[in-house]
Amino acid sequence: QVELMESGGGSVQAGGSLRLSCATSPNSYSGVAWFRQGAGKEREEREPVAAICAGSGDTFYSDSVKGRFTISQDNFKTTVYLNMTSLRPEDTGMYYCAARPRFSTCGSRWALPELYRNNWGQGTQVTVSA
């Protein structure tokens, strides 16, 4: 199991920026994705936001955040970042990072939460006010 810990959430006004971090053990994942869960939504309704593959560095984004959010990872593969700009009230939610263990496939199916099994962090809250 991959251990993950998110940080960096907070409250901002619309148009503002935040950077989320997802810390994990070195070289423990093949890919990390960010998901968000709106208030009153169930775990099964978590919305995919972005993902990055450890080896190739390929990145993936949902249409709702493309051009505003950027996902990246450090050189030691211990932290994955989600840089969020031009935030909107609809970006509000609990943000979770999830990982696919090392040697797993990372690619076009990144948005399927079931692929991450039990490899989820505890979440960090992002609140964007109008």
Image (cartoon, rainbow, N blue to C red):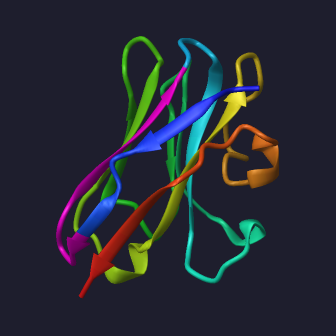
Query: Is 121 covered by the magenta stretch?
Result: no
State the image coordinates of residue 78 (x, y, percent, origin top left): 46, 19
Looking at this view, is 60 or 102 the one in front?
A: 102
Residue 97 shown left or right of residue 22 in the figure: right
| Magenta part of the chain | 12-24
Query: Magenta region's main secondary structure?
Result: strand
Viewer can see residue 23: yes
Query: Is 23 covered by the magenta stretch?
Result: yes
Q: Residue at x 59, y 48 (%)?
A: 122
Q: Is residue 73 above or below residue 97?
A: above
Viewer can see residue 106: no
Q: Residue at x 38, y 34 (%)?
A: 72
State the image coordinates of residue 85 (x, y, percent, origin top left): 24, 60
Q: Residue at x 60, y 43 (%)?
A: 121
State the image coordinates of residue 14 (x, y, percent, origin top left): 21, 78
Quadrant housing the N terminus? top right
Residue 36 shown left or right of residue 73 in the figure: right
Q: Is residue 100 above or below residue 86?
A: above
